[in-house]
Amino acid sequence: MRAQKQRAIGPWTGVGVLAALCTGTPAWAGDLDFQLNASKNGQGILFDSCGAGCYQANEAAFRDFTTQLGFVLAPRMASPAETLGHAGFSVGAMWSGSFVSSDQNYWNVTNRGQSPAGAKAMLQTLQLDVRKGLPFSFEVGANFMWLADSELFAPGLEVRWALQEGHPYIPDLAVRGAVNHMVGNRDLLLTTVAVDGVLSKGFGLGGTVNLAPYVGWSLVMIAATSRVIDPTPLDEEDLAGNLVFQERKATAKVGHKLTAGLRLLYSVLNVSVQGEFQMLPDYETGGSGVTTITTKLGLDF
């Protein structure tokens, strides 16, 4: 964990920070990096002791932790239903702040949770987003997301299809499939899949600005697989207590997310603001739904 205090990350620094990350910097452990074998006050966070040299995985806490982390790293909608057109191209930078249940014990697996300061309530992500329009109202995109104060990244891909767009009186309607895969942690493999439906309607202002409010509903599926976890890392010879968490399949438990936002388009400049709300949260050990606020600055050609 770094000793110096972290500076706040503003919503419009995404491109610069992501470019710096890609130039190659020494590895470091951030506040939000985590270990599934972490303990606090002599007690395992995601595992329990069942006797001398015996440890048992707390599967419910593992599922709740991966649910919240999955929603933090889930694909962002960040655009209305209308597509770019077959020759269109878009590039944008996004800042997001996600509010998680930091009062729940499972967030103490992070480096910050291990410190006297306790787990962070808001997790920030920066994302570089690129999309390309295709014929027949299709669109493909790729993104590169970074969880600030960590070594965790979540690159992703998406495909969008507008079933209806451009009608003067009927709202635009589109569906999207997207996937993000987390990398950068030695203990956990995490993949988040989203299937979305979005409605929007654009309005012209003064002949120069287009406003498009949009609302969407997402089905969120999270797959999580742990590697072998050593509850006693200080004792290299004690291997009997090693454990693996039960694999979480993407379709085992489907989450829901409501997104509402507004896009402002001035010439090629795209400015968007949206909120994401985890709906119908169902946590086994405790926790409330993840809420995320996102701002986007981009160029649409």
Image (spheres, rainbow, N blue to C red):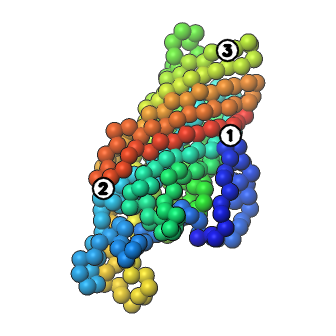
For the point 68% across and 32% down, the residue is 271
For the point 52% across and 46% down, the residue is 98
Q: Nearer the viewer, mark 2 or mark 1?
A: 2
Position above or below: 91 against 138: below
Q: Earlier in the sequence, mark 2 or mark 1?
A: 1
Disc 1 crowd rating (10 Å Cα; few below 14, some 14-19, many 20+) is many
For the point 41% across and 40% down, the residue is 278
Image location (x, y in percent) of residue 29: 59, 69
Position above or below: 131 against 33: above
Which residue type carries mark 3?
Gly
Which residue does the numbered mark 2 point to in the structure image?
285
Q: Are marks 3 and 2 in contact (CB under 8 Å)?
A: no
Q: Nearer the viewer, residue 285 or 66?
A: 285
| Furthest residue toward bottom | 237
Of the numbered discs in the image, which one, if any, rests on residue 204?
A: 3
Q: CA distance from mark 3 to mark 2?
A: 48 Å
Screen quadrant of the C terminus: top right
Q: Earlier in the sequence, mark 3 or mark 2?
A: 3
Which residue type carries mark 2?
Thr
Which residue does the numbered mark 1 point to in the structure image?
92
